[in-house]
Image: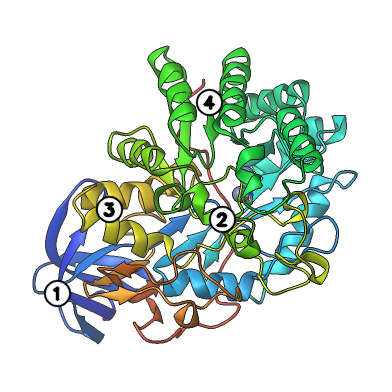
Amino acid sequence: MADALDLVIRNAEVATASDTFFCDIGIRGGRIALLGDGLPAGRREIDAAGRTVTPGGVDAHCHLDQAMEGPAKMADDFLTGTRSAACGGTTTIIPFAAQIKGQSLEAAVVDYHGRAEGKACIDYAFHLIVSDPTPQVLAKELPALIAQGYTSFKVYMTYDDLKLDDAQVLDVLDVARTHGALCMVHAENADCIEWLTKRLEAAGRTAPRWHAHARPMLVEREATHRAIALSELVDVPILIVHVSGREAIEQIRWARSHGLSIFAETCPQYLFLTAEDLGIDDSYHGARCICSPPPRDKANQEFIWNGLGDGLFTVFSSDHAPFRYEDPQGKKIGGKEVPFRYIPNGIPGLETRLPLLYSEGVLAGRITLQKFVELTATNPARAYGLHPRKGTIAVGSDADLVVWDEREVTVDNAALHHAVDYTPYEGMKLKAWPGLTLSRGEVVWDGKAFTGHAGRGRFLPCGTPSLLPRRP
Ligand code: DUC
Ligand code: ZN
Ligand code: ZN
């Protein structure tokens, strides 16, 4: 007879990306061992009657402890970041191992493993950021790293310390095609941003709100169009990250209507923030919401909602990039209110990603529960080669689960678990929050407190991304 179950979650309304069904979930050795009615007693039992259970979230785009140029420093390391993720229902993250120009990619990977080990509280994989595609990186390091389970990488079309020119992007895409990796693209036109920034500065327009004027939709639209063309030229799928609104969406729809494999991600900031959150006057407060691309307007939020519902978007990620507001290494870099050019880009969102979408998407009737699971767990796990171990509720999968509490919750930074001194969503009234988060069968969030511990998270080598065509 099989060993006794470690844990049985009874009477759950289980939601996957395809179905909803009522059953008990039997967990043994950190994995889902049985799904069925009337399971035998476990060593521990949880009654989930009347509550929905979804797969633990997979946040496929977040930045933790990422090395920065200059004095800026991310507020969250792998301990505070993964703790915060767990308390918001996320059980797997895919942050970045970022290459610094002049550094080998392999050295970057070793460095980021050092940052994560002993700290991560939930499981993690790594995307690579390729900022210096030297012949050695292209011919040797990238192929070797792909074979070792680093099967996705991000390229930037903007940011001086990270950006690649078109020929370099083509070189990286070529490696992705030959060796079976998925390339994520940050699509904004760097030259247009610099040109606009200089003109704004010359006119004395340097308050945080002008950040949005330096990065209008046009610069995202143009770069999205160019990224699509580069992908077509190499004949390899790409995934365009943090799409902010209509004009980029139109480019992606056009590409798809022409049979191109272009995939897309969006993030909570494009559903719940607008450019007005960067300021309607010259106050510095809006520095909190500076991220790139910037949030747009209400009309664009509707385009994003539609894209989530109709399959335009494959994944919904946080793009958590944590900087404290009152901090000389954060938004007040050097201890001062600085022109927008110097304000570190990024907002926190690991902990709020799932509750925001569950509440305002599922419970507000904008997307189905199945779509929620698909966007936040199943698709990111598939897209980056972690499925079926992660991202679903099935026999054999890791017992990464969220038991939802449908109750009114007011977002309050003091109740969050990151190391950032604000949340852009402060005061929002939500209709739900995770009541329990389980990571490999262990309760890591009990609805009141973090119950995991540093170092329990494991590194996950990634398999072949599902979005790639099968090649002989
Ligand atoms: N934009 C990014 O591309 N990455 C992190 C934060 C941001 O705003
Ligand atoms: Zn980006
Ligand atoms: Zn990012």
**Residue, disc 2:** 279
Nearest to the eye among marks 3 and 4: give it: 3
Q: Nearer the viewer, residue 271 or 399?
A: 271
Bin the neighbour count of mark 3 within 10 Å (Cα to Cα): few under 14, some 14-19, many 20 and up: many
**Amino acid under disc 3:** Gly
The front one of 168 and 325 is 325
Residue 416 point in image, percent of width and height? 48, 77
- Residue designated by label 1: 39
Total numbered labels: 4
Under mark 1, the amino acid is: Leu
Mark 2 and mark 1 lie on one chain; the one further toward the N terminus is 1
Residue at left offset 54%, top offset 40%? 241
**Mark closer to the chain start, 2 or 3:** 2
Left or right of 459? Residue 416 is left
Tell me the residue that label 4 is attached to. Answer: 237
Instruction: Determine the CA span between mark 1 and mark 4.
Output: 44 Å
Front of the two marks 1 and 3: 3
Q: Amino acid at mark 2?
A: Gly
Query: What kind of residue is marked 4?
Result: Pro
